Image: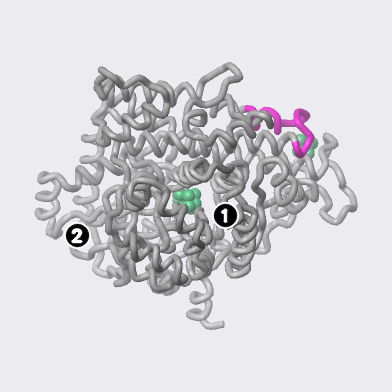
């Protein structure tokens, strides 16, 4: 295979191909090269049957039923796989929810006047307060914000057997009762994560079902707790997304300007960087160094947060982060937490790019560390922008920015969807009942170099909209489809006749971008509202979820809370559970009897679409529509 043929196998994105061939030419190692060096992957790890939870091991189980059948402590493959799965859910929940905690603390500090975070969306403030049962009459916005923040923080600290304030306020009744009867209502977010770490340590919980039930409980603490409160409080602080035009792909970088990429997950700093970059002082400074201005672009979920709220261009998704540096046009890549490749400082060494780490929790050898704190947010943001501007003069001549970027319409919060529909879900329900829209599918999650970059996201999405299924997206999936032009009004032409008619009437794309990965909570809220409006449970709805190119532990938490919320969820990358027949059976069959949702695994996006369409048709039939 020629080098070009090989690159064509790695991605469907033209700018990505272009940058990959430059990387090859220059001998710069990327994630795809490192994947190759890891292959073939360890079979025990892939099947989930290795355990490192104590030093009598590490232990591994013979996948073919021979010896060893047990770890030194006596743990079976079923126990080991279930324990490993639970730990993935715990890690994913911890990541989303720790982010949520940070937002709650920021809201509190802002309201107390200790940090420069005023309330942007007063309407949302009031609606969240009302949902939480907070009296708003006669109270100042700051007082209300403080009470909301405290309710959120209580969800991390409650020591009794009651459940989360946010879950109680947002979950549909039928679901709530089901979870209650199953004993999976989370007590507090931190506690469920700790519970998993405790019960998966040597000699505690050995029953795969019990371990999966705790995984479900913990994932609910993520979806209807940590992630949900992150979304809601970020909307209060930075505004609830409304439809806005944006651009996506590496072509958003601008050769004539100071390029700053903000990458990671939390908008608390990046919102301030956007503000600082727009300030007269910084604009002037940029002109002084010979640039035409400052171009702040996003990447991954920090990118999504800024894209859906302000239309800030997004330079790419997970697998494009290294390539952005290889353009030679990036003065600074500012990172916070999550999904930031440790390889970045190494690649940056070949260019003038400064990798600026900002979080106490995420340090990168080789990066410049400018630590962020909320109290001094404005000054720190300015310092970072200034560092980028001063670095402009160090840019080398050999800049290569692919000239492709795609226009997209994004920002479909639940509030925005409702307002596009004229204030209630009726129009959507009518369209579903009449069959113009057959159902809805949430396509979410990462990129993974084991999957052709963006291919599975885009193919699955195209198949579904062609079959009159509305698609909602978050995370790197949404960026993939933005780059493929599927988040534009032009994409309406790719939809089936029914969906086409509805999208044209509402003037919305057939694929709706809801935000970052914590905003998967918006999908839950939407599903809950649909179910209540129809007087059914979420598990009765003609809907499904999919994570076609997932890689992160966070995606395992998301997939699990989708399933636990009653949603059929298709994974495009095989999870490390095949070493246990018992766990596979629970995840792909028994879960449905318990919670009404289950997992399926299908690596071919066209076949995945068929599975989903069949599922949606069955659900429609059961509803009698
Ligand atoms: Fe990370 Fe959120 Fe996955 Fe993308 S989708 S690779 S988790 S940035 Ni969340
Ligand atoms: Fe081995 Fe059991 Fe220790 Fe795991 S917990 S490493 S299976 S002895």
Question: What's the residue at 83%, 34% (across, down)?
Answer: 73
- Residues 101 and 54: in front is 101
Where is residue 531 shown, x and y percent of the image?
53, 44
Membership of 333 in magenta stretch: no
| Ligand 1 has an atom within 8 Å of the beta carbon of the residue at disc 2 | no
SS at badge 2? loop
Q: Is residue 293 visible from the viewing direction of this image?
A: yes
- Residues 196 and 186: in front is 186
- Quadrant of the image for the N terminus? bottom right
The residues bearing labels 1 and 2 have C-alpha atoms spaced at a distance of 47 Å
Give left or right: position of 71 versus 273.
right
- Quadrant of the image for the C terminus? bottom right
* Stretch in magenta: 195-209
Where residue 93 sits, quadrant-wise, is top right
Residue receiving disc 1: 542
Q: Residue 274 carries which label?
A: none
SS at badge 1? loop
Where is residue 70 shown, x and y percent of the image?
85, 42
Q: Residues within 10 Å of mark 2 (few under 14, many from 20)?
A: many
Q: Residue furthest bottom?
A: 2
Where is residue 128 shown, x and y percent of the image?
37, 31
Give left or right: position of 509 versus 42.
left
Q: Which mark is residue 257?
A: 2
């Amino acid at each position: 295979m020629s080098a070009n043929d090989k690159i064509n196998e790695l991605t469907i994105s033209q700018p990505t191909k272009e940058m990959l061939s430059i990387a090859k030419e220059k001998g710069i190692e990327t994630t795809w090269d490192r994947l190759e060096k890891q292959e073939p992957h360890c079979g025990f790890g892939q099947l989930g049957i290795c355990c490192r939870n104590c030093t009598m091991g590490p232990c591994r189980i013979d996948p073919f039923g021979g010896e060893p059948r047990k770890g030194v402590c006596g743990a079976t493959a079923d126990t080991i796989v279930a324990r490993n799965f639970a730990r993935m859910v715990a890690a994913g929940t911890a990541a989303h929810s720790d982010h949520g905690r940070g937002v709650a603390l920021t809201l509190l500090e802002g309201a107390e006047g200790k940090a420069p975070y005023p309330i942007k969306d007063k309407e949302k403030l009031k609606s969240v307060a009302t949902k939480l049962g907070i009296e708003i009459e006669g109270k100042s916005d700051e007082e209300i914000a403080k009470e909301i923040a405290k309710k959120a923080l209580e969800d991390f600290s409650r020591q009794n057997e009651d459940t989360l304030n946010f879950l109680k306020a947002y979950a549909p009744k039928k679901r709530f009762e089901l979870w209650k009867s199953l004993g999976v209502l989370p007590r507090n977010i931190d506690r469920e994560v700790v519970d998993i770490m405790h019960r998966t340590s040597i000699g505690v919980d050995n029953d795969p079902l019990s371990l999966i039930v705790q995984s479900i409980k913990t994932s609910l603490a993520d979806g209807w707790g940590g992630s949900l409160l992150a979304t809601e409080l970020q909307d209060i602080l930075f505004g609830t997304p409304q439809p806005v035009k944006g651009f996506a792909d590496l072509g958003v970088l601008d050769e004539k300007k100071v390029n700053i990429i903000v990458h990671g997950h939390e908008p608390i700093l990046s919102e301030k960087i956007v503000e600082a970059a727009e300030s007269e002082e910084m604009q002037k400074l940029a002109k002084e160094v010979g640039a035409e201005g400052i171009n702040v672009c996003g990447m991954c979920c920090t990118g999504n947060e800024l894209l859906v709220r302000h239309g800030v261009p997004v330079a790419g998704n997970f697998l494009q982060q290294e390539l952005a540096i290889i353009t030679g046009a990036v003065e600074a890549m500012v990172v916070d937490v999550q999904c930031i490749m440790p390889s970045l400082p190494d690649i940056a060494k070949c260019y003038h790019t400064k990798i600026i780490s900002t979080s106490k929790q995420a340090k990168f050898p080789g990066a410049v560390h400018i630590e962020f704190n909320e109290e001094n947010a404005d000054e720190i943001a300015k310092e970072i922008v200034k560092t980028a501007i001063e670095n402009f003069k160090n840019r080398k001549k050999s800049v290569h920015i692919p000239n492709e970027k795609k226009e997209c319409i994004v920002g479909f919060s639940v509030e925005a969807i409702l307002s596009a529909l004229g204030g209630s879900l009726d129009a959507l329900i009518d369209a579903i009942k009449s069959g113009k829209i057959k159902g809805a599918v949430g396509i979410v999650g990462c990129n993974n170099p084991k999957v052709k970059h963006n291919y599975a996201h885009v193919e699955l999405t195209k198949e579904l909209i062609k079959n009159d299924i509305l698609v909602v997206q978050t995370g790197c999936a949404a960026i993939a489809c933005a780059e493929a032009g599927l988040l534009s009004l032009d994409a309406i032409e790719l939809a089936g006749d029914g969906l086409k008619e509805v999208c044209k009437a509402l003037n919305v794309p057939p694929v709706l971008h809801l935000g970052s990965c914590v905003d998967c909570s918006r999908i839950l809220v939407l599903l809950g509202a649909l179910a209540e409006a129809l007087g059914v449970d979420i598990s009765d709805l003609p809907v499904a979820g999919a994570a076609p190119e997932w890689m992160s532990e966070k995606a395992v938490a998301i997939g699990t809370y989708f399933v636990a919320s009653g949603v059929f969820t298709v994974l495009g990358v095989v999870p490390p559970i095949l070493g246990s027949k018992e766990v596979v059976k629970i995840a792909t069959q028994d879960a449905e009897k318990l919670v009404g949702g289950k997992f399926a695994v299908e690596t071919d996006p066209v076949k995945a679409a068929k599975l989903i369409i069949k599922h949606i048709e069955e659900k429609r039939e059961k509803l009698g529509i």
